C-alpha cells in the first residue's frame, strides 16, 4: 500500500509540473495567436484537462484558490490545498446531497403511500435497478448491505463526469489521483467484505492458494507459483478501475477540444475556413453526445465491477 501511495504521489508531482508547463504553453499560444501565428493547441488541452490552483468563473474571471503549507509524514508529502478538481469534487458531493435529501423529504411527505413522479420517480427506478440487477445479482446473499456504497459510487462518479461537460466546468475523474482514490475505496470494500464473509482462514486462501490432493511437494510448488499471482490479481482489479475511468474521461475531453481547436488552427485560411468551422462544430457536438453516454457508461461500469469483485471474493468457490 505504501508503494502504491508513493506511485500516486509521483504521478501527482508530475501532474503539478504538467500544469505549470501547460499554463506556460497557453500563454505562449495566446501570444502566438495575437501575433497572427498558429496557437498552441497542446497547451490549450493541458490548460483544460490538468488540475490547477485556480478557478475560471463567469463574470469573475481567474480566481486563485488558497494555498496551505504541506504536511510531511515520513517520506510522504501531503498537500491539503484545494485545487480545481477538489472544488468540483465537493460540488458533486453537494449536488448529490441536495438532490437525494430533497427526494427523501418528498418520499416521506407528498409521496408517502403512493408512487412518486418526476425526478423522484426516475431516481427511484435507478436505485431499484441497481439494487436488484447489479448488487443482488452479483453479490448474492447479504447484498443489500452494499447497495448504498455501490449507489454512492455510481452517482458520485456520474456527477463528476457530467460536471466536466458544462461551461467553465472540470471533470475530476480526468485526474488519475481521483480515480486512484476511488479505486482504493473499492479495494478496501472488496477485501474487508471478503474477510468478514470468509473469516481469517478462508480469506487467507484467497492469497495462499493450492488445489487439494497435490501432496506436500506439489502444494508447496503451487503456493510458490500462485501466491504472487493472487496478490497481483488483488492489485490489478483496482488498477483496472482506476485506469479505465481516467483514460475514457480524458480521451473524450481531448477529442472534443482537439476538434474545436481545428477552428483556430485553420482560422487564417482564406478558403475553406468556414467549412472547417462548421465541420469542427458538428463533429464536436456529435462527440459531446457520445461523451454524455460515456459519462453514464463509465459510472455504471465502475459500480458494476465493484459489485462483481465483492461477489467474487465473498463466494470464493
Image (cartoon, grey):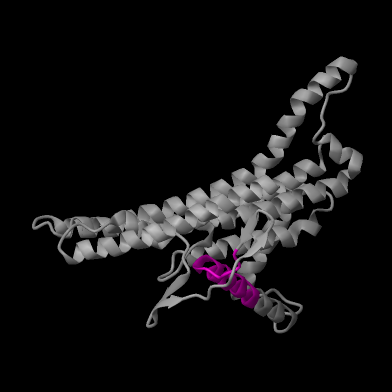
* x, y percent for residue 184: 68, 52
160 shown above or below 308: below
In the image, 118: left or right of 14? right
217 shown above or below 186: above
Please tell me whether the stretch drawn in magenta is mainly helix, strand or loop.
helix
In the picture, residue 281 is in which quadrant?
bottom left
* x, y percent for residue 302: 62, 51
Q: Which region of the structure is painted magenta?
A: 79-99
Residue 59 or residue 16, whichever sits in front: 16
In the image, 53: left or right of 144? left
**Residue 194 lies in the magenta stretch:** no
Residue depicted at x 78% and y 42%: 313
Residue 63 or residue 118, whichever sits in front: 63
Residue depicted at x 74% and y 52%: 188
**Residue 85 lies in the magenta stretch:** yes
Query: Looking at the image, can residue 97 be seen?
Result: yes
Residue 2 or residue 227, whichever sits in front: 2
Residue depicted at x 70% and y 84%: 110
In the picture, residue 37 is in which quadrant?
bottom left
Amino acid at each position: 500500500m505504501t508503494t502504491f501511495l508513493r506511485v500516486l504521489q509521483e504521478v501527482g508531482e508530475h501532474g503539478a509540473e504538467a500544469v505549470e508547463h501547460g499554463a506556460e504553453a497557453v500563454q505562449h499560444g495566446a501570444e502566438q495567436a495575437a501575433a497572427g501565428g498558429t496557437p498552441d493547441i497542446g497547451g490549450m488541452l493541458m490548460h483544460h484537462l490538468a488540475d490547477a490552483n485556480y478557478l475560471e468563473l463567469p463574470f469573475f474571471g481567474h480566481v486563485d484558490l488558497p494555498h496551505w503549507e504541506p504536511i510531511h509524514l515520513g517520506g510522504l508529502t501531503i498537500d491539503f490545498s484545494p485545487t480545481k478538481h477538489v472544488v468540483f469534487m465537493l460540488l458533486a458531493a453537494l449536488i448529490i446531497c441536495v438532490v437525494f435529501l430533497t427526494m427523501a423529504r418528498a418520499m416521506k411527505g407528498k409521496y408517502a403511500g403512493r408512487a412518486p413522479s418526476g425526478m423522484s420517480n426516475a431516481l427511484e427506478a435507478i436505485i431499484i435497478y441497481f439494487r436488484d440487477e447489479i448488487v443482488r445479482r452479483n453479490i448474492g446473499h447479504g447484498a443489500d448491505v452494499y447497495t448504498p456504497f455501490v449507489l454512492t459510487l455510481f452517482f458520485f462518479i456520474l456527477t463528476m463526469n457530467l460536471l466536466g461537460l458544462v461551461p467553465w466546468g472540470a471533470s475530476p475523474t480526468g485526474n488519475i489521483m481521483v480515480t486512484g482514490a476511488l479505486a482504493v475505496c473499492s479495494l478496501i470494500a472488496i477485501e474487508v467484505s471478503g474477510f468478514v464473509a470468509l473469516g481469517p482462514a478462508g480469506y487467507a486462501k484467497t492469497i495462499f492458494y493450492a488445489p487439494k490432493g497435490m501432496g506436500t511437494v506439489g502444494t508447496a510448488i503451487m503456493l510458490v507459483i500462485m501466491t504472487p499471482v493472487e496478490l497481483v490479481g488483488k492489485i490489478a482489479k483496482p488498477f483496472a478501475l482506476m485506469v479505465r475511468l481516467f483514460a475514457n474521461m480524458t480521451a473524450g475531453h481531448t477529442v472534443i477540444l482537439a476538434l474545436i481547436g481545428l477552428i483556430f488552427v485553420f482560422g487564417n485560411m482564406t478558403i475553406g475556413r468556414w467549412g472547417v468551422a462548421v465541420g469542427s462544430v458538428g463533429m464536436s457536438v456529435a462527440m459531446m453526445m457520445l461523451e454524455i453516454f460515456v459519462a453514464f457508461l463509465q459510472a455504471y461500469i465502475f459500480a458494476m465491477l465493484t459489485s462483481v469483485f465483492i461477489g467474487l471474493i465473498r463466494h470464493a468457490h
